[in-house]
């Protein structure tokens, strides 16, 4: 038997009860991460990638949400079985999270110093002055100029990129073993995005954090991830090492996403962009069989009837599509 | 050929409060001496980061803001001294597509009345004709005419943006100003909307000012690319020359910053350091110099002029 992976999600299903009916936002999602690895979770809005992250942190609003089944194994324990108290200890200490919008995720009435110091004081029991000193060190590490001045400022004094650096400093404060980054650069300008991605890559090298990176941007994935899971309507449809995914794209949805990108400014021009026809179906009204079949150019007889299982193209490349029926 | 739209030394200043506790006001120059031409049937792409003044420029052109200095000439007519009648005609000929398909549609109105509103305002046609025209437009942008009496919340983001496009088309405009029309949409929907905009352009011979922050996207749709930084144009380059000429250092930095969906497409250039400076107190000389990897002495003191370095290619940089 292979050794226990560092982090593992098995068959996770998270549902929401809405007035219109039960929604399966995450449906049977499984993946694993080795220590120091970065997994990119990609998909369009509503595909369940953020709910997956919230489920791991046990932050799904309850009700209306509910984690229906599955296991999340980390450090030999199933996170879904922990008490609220144990979970609170784990958040920030062992697994921390960076959110998309650095303005709304920082508290506007506390200084930067207070907010970064909070994790040191809560989780490591430091005194106020120790925590402030540690915060300055941490802010310095994420590339904030003159941190000893910045700790007395409020979030609105900082630019978007600086705020996101503060978020990263907060997330890294307790040297967590794992970090979940939910669209960490989506709200930023491209030149600032490049800085933050560089910083994350550099920190990854330095402190060997394992990262679950959630994004809709395939470019960010190509720059950051070691492996990739592509999600559609709450399910993973393709799961492969990063280079394998781009070089031997298998699932028609992944192919569609890649083709609908405008060519990079350094690449050959295209006359028209290729598109995926139709729109992402509502989770309340999913098509039968393969959830992508009504938008898929390759759909054939079995697709509308039954949902395809995962076919294994090779040891590490899984795809949920009947095109690959020949593979076991 | 005279251009359809010409901006001459256009400038827009805003008075902003220096601090919430002080009375004093400072001047923020959002658009700083911009000279630009758009020829009929052409698509000009305007790129820049947030706060560079691209949206203010769009709002000046559609007359949602008044310029502080400079002139806007539309089809040979100076917009600064329009009478009411000319103004109404101008507003029919220039339309805008907004970024956010959620906040730019009135949630209490049906899409039919949203699209038909401009006809009502300009007293065109009777209600039957308006209805027919709206349905025609809906078909044109790929919406089913049966959706006429539905409300915006019943549509997805991509469909709402189609409603916004149909509304902009309803008066047969000559110029459409599209301010980040796809940046709120998912990738696969983005491509659909971009293709639609391109099809409509050739079908109705439209002229576009296409504003976006994504350089790859702008290069895909535009015939000519304008790059803006801190309220100023730093480069103007026709699409055919893009990537083949010596670009402005900021354009190069933008190019290097875009993550490419191709493993190993590692960039040569380092990302830019620092943030975009505040437009209230811009750096002296060339406003880009604090972040510029190629800066020399002269950049600190003398602001460069936008000049033609080769045919149709303009750059504002001392080093080019």
Image (spheres, helix red, strand yellow):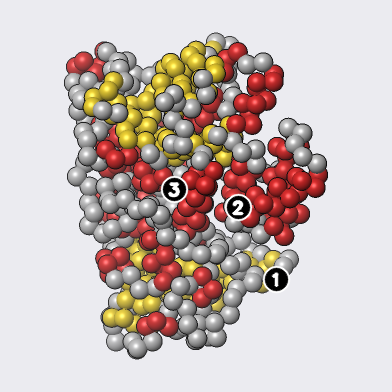
Q: Helix, strand, or loop for circle 1?
A: strand
Dots 1, 3 in contact, CB < 8 A: no
In this rendering, position of residue B17 left or right of residue B278: right
Mark 3 or mark 1, which is nearer the start of the sequence? 1
Q: Quadrant of the C terminus of chain A?
A: bottom left
Q: Residue at x 59, y 45 (%)?
A: B165
Q: Residue furthest top?
A: B24
Q: Chain of mark 3?
A: A
Comparing labels 2 and 1, the label whose residue is closer to the camera: 2
In this rendering, position of residue B139 left or right of residue A298: right
Dots 3, 2 in contact, CB < 8 A: no
- Which residue has dot 2 on it? B140
- Which residue has dot 3 on it? A186
Nearer the observer, B308 or A122: B308
Nearer the observer, B167 or A48: B167
Q: Residue at x 47, y 32 (%)?
A: B40
- Residue A79 sits above or below residue B89 on the image: below
Q: Helix, strand, or loop for circle 3?
A: loop
- Residue B197 sits above or below residue B147 on the image: above
- Residue A209 sits above or below residue A67 on the image: above
Q: Are there few (<14), some (14-19), or many (20+) residues within 10 Å of tag 3?
A: some
Q: Quadrant of the N terminus of chain A?
A: bottom left
């Amino acid at each position: 038997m292979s050794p226990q992976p560092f982090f593992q999600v098995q068959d996770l299903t998270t549902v929401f009860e809405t007035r219109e009916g039960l929604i399966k936002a995450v449906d049977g999602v499984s993946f694993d991460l080795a220590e120091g690895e970065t997994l990119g979770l990609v998909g369009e809005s509503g595909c369940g990638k953020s709910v997956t992250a919230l489920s791991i942190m046990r932050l799904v609003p309850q009700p209306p949400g509910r984690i229906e089944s599955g296991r999340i194994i980390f450090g030999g324990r199933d996170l879904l079985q922990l008490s609220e108290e144990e979970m609170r200890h784990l958040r920030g200490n062992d697994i921390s999270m960076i959110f998309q919008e650095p303005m709304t995720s920082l508290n506007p009435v506390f200084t930067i110093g207070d907010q970064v110091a909070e994790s040191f004081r809560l989780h490591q029991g430091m005194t106020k002055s120790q925590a402030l000193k540690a915060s300055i060190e941490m802010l310095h590490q994420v590339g904030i100029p003159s941190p000893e001045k910045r700790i007395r400022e409020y979030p609105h004094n900082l630019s978007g990129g600086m705020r996101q650096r503060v978020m990263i400093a907060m997330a890294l404060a307790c040297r967590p073993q794992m970090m979940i980054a939910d669209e960490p650069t989506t709200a930023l300008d491209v030149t600032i995005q490049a800085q933050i991605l560089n910083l994350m890559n550099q920190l990854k090298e330095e402190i060997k954090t394992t990262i679950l990176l959630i994004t809709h941007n395939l470019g960010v994935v190509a720059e950051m991830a070691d492996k990739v899971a592509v999600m559609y309507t709450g399910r993973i449809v393709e799961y492969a090492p990063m280079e394998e995914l781009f070089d031997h794209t298998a699932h028609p949805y992944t192919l569609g996403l890649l083709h609908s990108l405008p060519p990079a400014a350094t690449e050959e021009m295209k006359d028209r962009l290729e598109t995926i026809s139709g729109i992402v179906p509502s989770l309340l009204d999913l098509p039968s069989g393969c959830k992508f079949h009504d938008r898929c150019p390759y759909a054939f007889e079995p697709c509308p009837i039954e949902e395809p299982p995962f076919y294994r193209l090779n040891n590490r490349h899984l795809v949920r599509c009947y095109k690959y029926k020949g593979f076991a | 050929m005279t251009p359809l739209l010409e901006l001459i030394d256009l400038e827009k200043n805003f008075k902003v409060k220096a601090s919430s506790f002080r009375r004093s006001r400072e001047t923020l120059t959002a658009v700083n001496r911009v000279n630009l031409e758009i020829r009929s049937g052409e698509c000009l792409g305007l790129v820049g980061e947030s706060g560079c003044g691209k949206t203010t420029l769009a709002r000046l052109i559609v007359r949602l803001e008044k310029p502080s200095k400079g002139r806007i000439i539309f089809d040979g007519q100076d917009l600064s001294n329009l009478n009411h009648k000319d103004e109404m005609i101008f507003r029919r000929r220039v339309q805008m597509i907004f970024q956010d398909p959620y906040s730019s549609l009135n949630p209490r109105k049906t899409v039919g009345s949203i699209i038909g509103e401009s006809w009502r305002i300009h007293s065109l046609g009777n209600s039957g004709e308006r209805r027919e025209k709206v349905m025609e437009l809906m078909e044109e942008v790929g919406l089913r005419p049966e959706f006429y009496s539905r409300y915006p919340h019943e549509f997805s983001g991509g469909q709402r943006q189609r409603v916004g496009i149909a509304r902009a088309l309803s008066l047969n405009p000559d110029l459409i100003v599209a301010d980040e029309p796809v940046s709120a949409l998912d990738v696969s929907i983005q491509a659909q909307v971009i293709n639609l905009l391109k099809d409509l352009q050739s079908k109705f011979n439209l002229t576009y000012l296409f504003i976006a922050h994504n350089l790859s996207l702008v290069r895909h749709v535009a015939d000519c690319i304008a790059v803006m930084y801190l309220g100023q144009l730093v480069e103007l380059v026709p699409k055919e020359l893009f990537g083949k000429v010596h670009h402005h250092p900021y354009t190069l930095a933008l190019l290097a910053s875009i993550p490419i969906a191709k493993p190993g497409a590692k960039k040569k250039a380092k990302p830019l350091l620092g943030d975009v400076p505040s437009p209230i107190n811009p750096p002296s000389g060339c406003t880009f110099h604090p972040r510029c990897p190629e800066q020399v002495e002269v950049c600190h003191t003398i602001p460069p002029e936008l000049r033609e370095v080769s045919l149709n290619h303009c750059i504002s940089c001392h080093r080019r």
